[in-house]
Amino acid sequence: MSQSKKRWIVGLGIVGVAVVSVALGRRTPTFSGDAPAYRQTGAPRARVVISEYSDFQCPKCGAVVPIVKGLLSAYPKDVRLVFHHAPLKQHKWAIPAAHAAESAGLQGKFWEYAETLFSKQTEWSPSTDPKPFFISYAKDLGLNADQFTTDMDSVFIAETIRKEKAHADAIEVPATPTFFINDRMLVGDTQLSGNGARYIEQELVR
Amino acid sequence: MMKGRAILSMAAPVFRIVPGAVLAVSGYLKAVRPAAEFAATLDSYWVFPSFLVFPIAKIVPWVELLVGLSLVVGFMTRASALVAACLYAAFVAILAQGIFRKLPMTDCGCFGQVGPHLQPIQALGLDAVLLVICLLVLLDTERKFAADQWIEQP
Protein backbone atom coordinates (compact mmCIF):
# COMPACT_ATOMS: atom_id res chain seq x y z
CA MET A 1 0.00 0.00 0.00
CA SER A 2 1.40 3.43 -0.87
CA GLN A 3 2.31 5.92 1.84
CA SER A 4 -0.25 8.42 0.62
CA LYS A 5 -3.00 5.79 0.75
CA LYS A 6 -2.03 4.88 4.31
CA ARG A 7 -1.99 8.57 5.24
CA TRP A 8 -5.50 9.00 3.87
CA ILE A 9 -6.74 5.95 5.76
CA VAL A 10 -5.36 7.16 9.11
CA GLY A 11 -6.42 10.76 8.53
CA LEU A 12 -9.97 9.84 7.56
CA GLY A 13 -10.09 7.41 10.48
CA ILE A 14 -9.24 10.20 12.91
CA VAL A 15 -11.83 12.54 11.39
CA GLY A 16 -14.40 9.72 11.45
CA VAL A 17 -13.75 8.89 15.10
CA ALA A 18 -14.03 12.59 16.01
CA VAL A 19 -17.26 13.17 14.09
CA VAL A 20 -18.97 9.98 15.28
CA SER A 21 -17.95 10.45 18.93
CA VAL A 22 -19.19 14.05 18.97
CA ALA A 23 -22.42 13.09 17.19
CA LEU A 24 -23.06 10.32 19.72
CA GLY A 25 -22.08 12.41 22.72
CA ARG A 26 -23.79 15.64 21.70
CA ARG A 27 -26.01 16.79 24.48
CA THR A 28 -28.23 19.57 23.32
CA PRO A 29 -29.99 20.78 26.44
CA THR A 30 -33.72 20.23 26.25
CA PHE A 31 -35.17 23.25 27.95
CA SER A 32 -38.65 23.23 29.31
CA GLY A 33 -41.34 25.62 28.20
CA ASP A 34 -43.32 24.41 31.18
CA ALA A 35 -43.90 27.16 33.72
CA PRO A 36 -46.91 28.64 35.50
CA ALA A 37 -48.73 31.34 33.56
CA TYR A 38 -47.51 34.09 35.88
CA ARG A 39 -43.91 33.34 34.87
CA GLN A 40 -44.72 33.81 31.18
CA THR A 41 -45.16 37.07 29.36
CA GLY A 42 -45.49 38.23 25.76
CA ALA A 43 -47.54 36.78 22.93
CA PRO A 44 -49.39 33.63 24.08
CA ARG A 45 -49.13 31.92 20.66
CA ALA A 46 -45.66 33.21 19.89
CA ARG A 47 -43.51 31.46 17.29
CA VAL A 48 -40.43 32.26 19.34
CA VAL A 49 -40.16 31.35 23.00
CA ILE A 50 -37.32 32.80 25.03
CA SER A 51 -36.64 30.62 28.06
CA GLU A 52 -34.59 32.50 30.62
CA TYR A 53 -32.70 30.70 33.40
CA SER A 54 -31.95 33.28 36.02
CA ASP A 55 -30.82 33.89 39.59
CA PHE A 56 -32.09 36.97 41.46
CA GLN A 57 -28.77 37.45 43.27
CA CYS A 58 -26.70 37.40 40.09
CA PRO A 59 -25.76 40.93 38.93
CA LYS A 60 -25.68 39.99 35.23
CA CYS A 61 -29.24 38.66 35.49
CA GLY A 62 -30.30 42.14 36.55
CA ALA A 63 -28.29 43.69 33.75
CA VAL A 64 -30.22 41.76 31.08
CA VAL A 65 -33.65 43.04 32.14
CA PRO A 66 -33.60 46.02 29.71
CA ILE A 67 -32.27 43.79 26.90
CA VAL A 68 -35.05 41.25 27.40
CA LYS A 69 -37.65 44.03 27.62
CA GLY A 70 -36.28 45.50 24.39
CA LEU A 71 -36.69 42.16 22.59
CA LEU A 72 -40.23 41.72 23.89
CA SER A 73 -41.25 45.19 22.78
CA ALA A 74 -39.54 44.80 19.38
CA TYR A 75 -41.47 41.58 18.67
CA PRO A 76 -44.77 42.00 20.54
CA LYS A 77 -46.64 39.43 18.42
CA ASP A 78 -43.90 36.90 17.94
CA VAL A 79 -42.07 36.44 21.21
CA ARG A 80 -43.01 34.95 24.57
CA LEU A 81 -40.70 34.97 27.58
CA VAL A 82 -40.70 32.12 30.08
CA PHE A 83 -38.79 32.61 33.31
CA HIS A 84 -37.04 29.71 35.06
CA HIS A 85 -35.31 29.79 38.41
CA ALA A 86 -31.66 28.67 38.35
CA PRO A 87 -30.40 29.71 41.80
CA LEU A 88 -26.65 29.26 42.05
CA LYS A 89 -24.95 27.58 45.01
CA GLN A 90 -22.63 30.51 45.65
CA HIS A 91 -25.55 32.92 46.09
CA LYS A 92 -26.78 32.55 49.64
CA TRP A 93 -30.08 34.38 49.17
CA ALA A 94 -30.90 33.24 45.64
CA ILE A 95 -33.31 30.53 46.81
CA PRO A 96 -35.17 32.73 49.36
CA ALA A 97 -35.43 35.41 46.65
CA ALA A 98 -36.89 32.83 44.26
CA HIS A 99 -39.41 31.87 46.98
CA ALA A 100 -40.37 35.52 47.35
CA ALA A 101 -40.80 35.99 43.61
CA GLU A 102 -42.97 32.87 43.40
CA SER A 103 -45.11 34.17 46.25
CA ALA A 104 -45.56 37.44 44.38
CA GLY A 105 -46.39 35.40 41.30
CA LEU A 106 -49.20 33.63 43.13
CA GLN A 107 -50.70 37.08 43.69
CA GLY A 108 -50.22 38.00 40.03
CA LYS A 109 -47.19 40.26 40.34
CA PHE A 110 -44.24 38.04 39.43
CA TRP A 111 -42.68 40.35 36.83
CA GLU A 112 -43.03 43.52 38.89
CA TYR A 113 -41.57 41.76 41.89
CA ALA A 114 -38.70 40.23 39.85
CA GLU A 115 -37.82 43.66 38.53
CA THR A 116 -37.82 45.05 42.08
CA LEU A 117 -35.51 42.25 43.25
CA PHE A 118 -33.08 43.02 40.45
CA SER A 119 -33.21 46.78 40.83
CA LYS A 120 -32.75 46.58 44.62
CA GLN A 121 -30.23 43.75 44.53
CA THR A 122 -27.53 45.83 46.23
CA GLU A 123 -29.92 46.42 49.15
CA TRP A 124 -31.01 42.87 50.05
CA SER A 125 -28.15 40.81 48.61
CA PRO A 126 -25.46 41.79 51.17
CA SER A 127 -27.87 41.78 54.13
CA THR A 128 -27.76 39.19 56.89
CA ASP A 129 -31.51 38.59 56.62
CA PRO A 130 -33.21 39.59 53.37
CA LYS A 131 -36.71 38.50 54.43
CA PRO A 132 -37.79 41.92 55.82
CA PHE A 133 -36.71 43.48 52.51
CA PHE A 134 -38.72 40.91 50.57
CA ILE A 135 -41.82 41.62 52.65
CA SER A 136 -41.42 45.38 52.29
CA TYR A 137 -41.11 45.07 48.50
CA ALA A 138 -44.29 42.98 48.50
CA LYS A 139 -46.09 45.68 50.47
CA ASP A 140 -44.79 48.38 48.09
CA LEU A 141 -46.36 46.47 45.21
CA GLY A 142 -49.68 46.27 47.07
CA LEU A 143 -49.54 42.56 47.75
CA ASN A 144 -51.23 40.92 50.70
CA ALA A 145 -48.23 40.73 53.06
CA ASP A 146 -49.65 37.98 55.30
CA GLN A 147 -50.45 35.77 52.35
CA PHE A 148 -47.08 36.59 50.81
CA THR A 149 -45.22 35.55 53.99
CA THR A 150 -47.22 32.33 54.33
CA ASP A 151 -46.64 31.43 50.67
CA MET A 152 -42.94 32.22 50.86
CA ASP A 153 -42.49 29.53 53.52
CA SER A 154 -44.87 27.04 51.93
CA VAL A 155 -43.91 23.50 51.00
CA PHE A 156 -45.54 24.03 47.61
CA ILE A 157 -43.16 26.85 46.68
CA ALA A 158 -40.16 25.03 48.16
CA GLU A 159 -41.01 22.05 45.96
CA THR A 160 -41.49 24.30 42.90
CA ILE A 161 -38.05 25.87 43.37
CA ARG A 162 -36.46 22.48 44.04
CA LYS A 163 -37.88 21.16 40.77
CA GLU A 164 -36.75 24.27 38.89
CA LYS A 165 -33.23 23.96 40.26
CA ALA A 166 -33.14 20.24 39.44
CA HIS A 167 -34.26 21.04 35.90
CA ALA A 168 -31.57 23.73 35.49
CA ASP A 169 -28.96 21.29 36.81
CA ALA A 170 -30.21 18.50 34.55
CA ILE A 171 -29.80 20.58 31.41
CA GLU A 172 -26.45 21.82 32.74
CA VAL A 173 -27.23 25.52 32.63
CA PRO A 174 -23.63 26.75 32.46
CA ALA A 175 -24.10 30.15 34.06
CA THR A 176 -26.78 32.68 34.74
CA PRO A 177 -28.43 34.19 32.86
CA THR A 178 -28.77 31.52 30.18
CA PHE A 179 -31.35 31.88 27.43
CA PHE A 180 -32.85 29.54 24.92
CA ILE A 181 -34.35 31.24 21.89
CA ASN A 182 -36.53 28.31 20.88
CA ASP A 183 -33.76 25.70 21.13
CA ARG A 184 -30.70 27.91 20.58
CA MET A 185 -28.63 28.71 23.63
CA LEU A 186 -27.14 32.07 24.57
CA VAL A 187 -25.18 32.63 27.76
CA GLY A 188 -24.90 36.02 29.43
CA ASP A 189 -25.84 39.59 28.67
CA THR A 190 -23.24 40.13 25.93
CA GLN A 191 -24.42 37.14 23.91
CA LEU A 192 -28.08 38.11 24.31
CA SER A 193 -27.54 41.73 23.28
CA GLY A 194 -25.27 40.69 20.40
CA ASN A 195 -27.26 37.77 19.01
CA GLY A 196 -30.77 37.82 20.53
CA ALA A 197 -32.51 39.82 17.81
CA ARG A 198 -30.67 37.95 15.05
CA TYR A 199 -31.71 34.57 16.47
CA ILE A 200 -35.32 35.71 16.75
CA GLU A 201 -35.29 36.91 13.13
CA GLN A 202 -33.82 33.57 12.04
CA GLU A 203 -36.47 31.64 13.97
CA LEU A 204 -39.22 33.75 12.40
CA VAL A 205 -38.16 32.91 8.85
CA ARG A 206 -37.81 29.17 9.55
CA MET B 1 23.75 13.85 24.38
CA MET B 2 23.27 10.34 23.01
CA LYS B 3 21.84 9.23 26.35
CA GLY B 4 19.41 12.16 26.30
CA ARG B 5 18.27 11.21 22.82
CA ALA B 6 17.77 7.60 23.91
CA ILE B 7 15.66 8.65 26.91
CA LEU B 8 13.62 11.01 24.74
CA SER B 9 13.05 8.26 22.22
CA MET B 10 11.82 5.90 24.95
CA ALA B 11 9.58 8.49 26.58
CA ALA B 12 8.32 9.96 23.29
CA PRO B 13 5.16 7.82 23.01
CA VAL B 14 4.07 8.95 26.49
CA PHE B 15 5.06 12.55 25.75
CA ARG B 16 2.94 12.38 22.61
CA ILE B 17 -0.07 10.68 24.17
CA VAL B 18 -0.43 12.81 27.32
CA PRO B 19 -0.83 16.29 25.73
CA GLY B 20 -2.76 14.69 22.87
CA ALA B 21 -5.23 13.01 25.22
CA VAL B 22 -5.70 16.22 27.24
CA LEU B 23 -6.40 18.17 24.04
CA ALA B 24 -8.73 15.50 22.66
CA VAL B 25 -10.74 15.27 25.89
CA SER B 26 -11.01 19.04 26.33
CA GLY B 27 -12.02 19.47 22.69
CA TYR B 28 -14.57 16.67 22.88
CA LEU B 29 -16.19 17.99 26.07
CA LYS B 30 -16.64 21.39 24.47
CA ALA B 31 -17.69 20.12 21.03
CA VAL B 32 -20.61 18.12 22.45
CA ARG B 33 -22.10 21.20 24.10
CA PRO B 34 -23.65 24.28 22.48
CA ALA B 35 -21.03 26.77 21.27
CA ALA B 36 -22.63 29.44 23.47
CA GLU B 37 -21.13 27.78 26.54
CA PHE B 38 -17.54 28.01 25.37
CA ALA B 39 -18.28 31.44 23.90
CA ALA B 40 -19.25 32.61 27.39
CA THR B 41 -15.91 31.35 28.70
CA LEU B 42 -14.07 33.17 25.92
CA ASP B 43 -16.05 36.32 26.72
CA SER B 44 -14.86 36.14 30.31
CA TYR B 45 -11.21 36.47 29.20
CA TRP B 46 -11.86 39.88 27.60
CA VAL B 47 -9.45 39.17 24.76
CA PHE B 48 -11.51 38.52 21.65
CA PRO B 49 -13.72 41.01 19.81
CA SER B 50 -17.34 39.95 20.15
CA PHE B 51 -17.77 39.14 16.44
CA LEU B 52 -14.98 36.55 16.71
CA VAL B 53 -16.15 34.83 19.88
CA PHE B 54 -18.73 32.50 18.33
CA PRO B 55 -16.59 31.43 15.33
CA ILE B 56 -13.68 30.69 17.70
CA ALA B 57 -16.02 28.81 20.08
CA LYS B 58 -17.20 26.63 17.18
CA ILE B 59 -13.80 25.94 15.60
CA VAL B 60 -11.32 25.59 18.48
CA PRO B 61 -12.91 22.50 20.13
CA TRP B 62 -12.75 20.64 16.80
CA VAL B 63 -9.14 21.68 16.24
CA GLU B 64 -8.30 20.48 19.77
CA LEU B 65 -10.09 17.18 19.19
CA LEU B 66 -8.51 16.45 15.79
CA VAL B 67 -5.00 17.54 16.78
CA GLY B 68 -5.31 15.66 20.08
CA LEU B 69 -6.37 12.43 18.35
CA SER B 70 -3.59 12.84 15.76
CA LEU B 71 -1.02 13.16 18.54
CA VAL B 72 -2.43 10.16 20.42
CA VAL B 73 -2.16 7.87 17.39
CA GLY B 74 1.02 9.53 16.15
CA PHE B 75 -0.34 10.78 12.82
CA MET B 76 1.65 13.62 11.22
CA THR B 77 3.35 13.78 14.58
CA ARG B 78 5.60 16.80 14.03
CA ALA B 79 2.83 18.92 12.52
CA SER B 80 0.37 17.82 15.22
CA ALA B 81 2.88 18.55 17.98
CA LEU B 82 3.57 21.96 16.48
CA VAL B 83 -0.14 22.87 16.32
CA ALA B 84 -0.66 21.48 19.83
CA ALA B 85 2.28 23.56 21.09
CA CYS B 86 0.76 26.66 19.47
CA LEU B 87 -2.60 25.91 21.12
CA TYR B 88 -1.00 25.42 24.54
CA ALA B 89 1.08 28.59 24.08
CA ALA B 90 -2.10 30.51 23.22
CA PHE B 91 -3.88 29.08 26.30
CA VAL B 92 -0.92 30.06 28.51
CA ALA B 93 -0.95 33.60 27.10
CA ILE B 94 -4.73 34.01 27.49
CA LEU B 95 -4.77 32.62 31.03
CA ALA B 96 -1.73 34.67 32.05
CA GLN B 97 -3.29 37.93 30.87
CA GLY B 98 -6.51 37.07 32.71
CA ILE B 99 -4.62 36.36 35.93
CA PHE B 100 -2.44 39.45 35.49
CA ARG B 101 -5.51 41.67 34.93
CA LYS B 102 -7.25 40.01 37.90
CA LEU B 103 -10.31 39.16 35.80
CA PRO B 104 -13.15 37.59 37.76
CA MET B 105 -12.55 34.00 36.57
CA THR B 106 -13.35 31.09 38.85
CA ASP B 107 -12.97 28.31 36.31
CA CYS B 108 -10.66 28.19 33.28
CA GLY B 109 -13.42 26.61 31.16
CA CYS B 110 -10.79 24.40 29.52
CA PHE B 111 -12.93 21.26 29.74
CA GLY B 112 -16.32 22.86 29.23
CA GLN B 113 -18.90 22.76 31.99
CA VAL B 114 -18.83 19.01 32.55
CA GLY B 115 -15.15 18.22 32.83
CA PRO B 116 -12.70 18.97 35.62
CA HIS B 117 -13.00 22.55 36.84
CA LEU B 118 -9.50 23.98 37.14
CA GLN B 119 -8.65 27.34 38.65
CA PRO B 120 -6.98 29.59 36.05
CA ILE B 121 -3.64 29.32 37.87
CA GLN B 122 -3.85 25.50 37.87
CA ALA B 123 -4.72 25.50 34.16
CA LEU B 124 -1.82 27.84 33.46
CA GLY B 125 0.60 25.42 35.14
CA LEU B 126 -0.84 22.40 33.33
CA ASP B 127 -0.76 24.12 29.93
CA ALA B 128 2.82 25.30 30.45
CA VAL B 129 3.96 21.74 31.26
CA LEU B 130 2.09 20.32 28.27
CA LEU B 131 3.58 23.01 26.02
CA VAL B 132 7.10 21.93 27.02
CA ILE B 133 6.17 18.27 26.43
CA CYS B 134 4.88 19.10 22.93
CA LEU B 135 8.17 20.85 22.16
CA LEU B 136 10.04 17.71 23.27
CA VAL B 137 7.88 15.63 20.89
CA LEU B 138 9.15 17.84 18.05
CA LEU B 139 12.69 16.68 18.84
CA ASP B 140 11.87 12.98 18.57
CA THR B 141 12.75 11.44 15.22
CA GLU B 142 12.05 7.77 15.87
CA ARG B 143 8.24 7.90 16.16
CA LYS B 144 7.93 4.72 18.23
CA PHE B 145 4.41 3.26 18.40
CA ALA B 146 3.20 5.99 16.06
CA ALA B 147 0.98 5.65 13.00
CA ASP B 148 3.66 7.62 11.14
CA GLN B 149 6.04 4.68 11.54
CA TRP B 150 3.55 2.36 9.82
CA ILE B 151 2.83 4.93 7.12
CA GLU B 152 6.50 5.43 6.34
CA GLN B 153 7.24 1.69 6.09
CA PRO B 154 7.83 0.71 2.50
Image (cartoon, grey):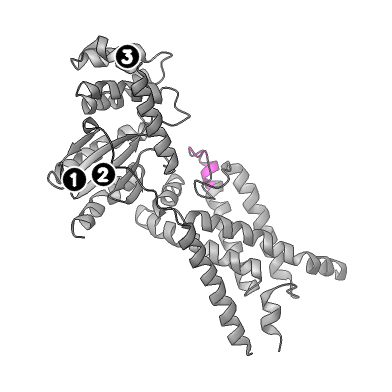
Q: Which element is circle 1 on?
A: strand
Which mark is nearer the camera, 1 or 3? Answer: 1
Q: Is residue A160 left or right of residue A16?
A: left
x then y, percent, for residue B32: 47, 56
Return the disc, 1 or 2, that comes first in the chain's sequence. 2
Identity of the residue drawn at 66% across and 56% down? B130
**The N terminus of chain B is located in which quarter?**
bottom right
Task: Give me the chain letter of mark 3.
Answer: A
Same chain for mark 1 and mark 2? The answer is yes
* Residue at image mark 2: A50
* Residue at image mark 3: A133
Residue A79: mark: 1
Identity of the residue drawn at 52% across and 58% down? B28
Task: Give me the chain letter of mark 2.
Answer: A
Give the Cα separation between the discs numbered 2 and 3: 29 Å
Q: Main secondary structure of the magenta part?
A: loop
**Badge 3 amino acid:** Phe
The magenta span reads B97-106
Q: Is residue A187 above or below residue A38?
A: below
Return the disc, 1 or 3, that comes first in the chain's sequence. 1
* Whether residue A180 is visible: yes
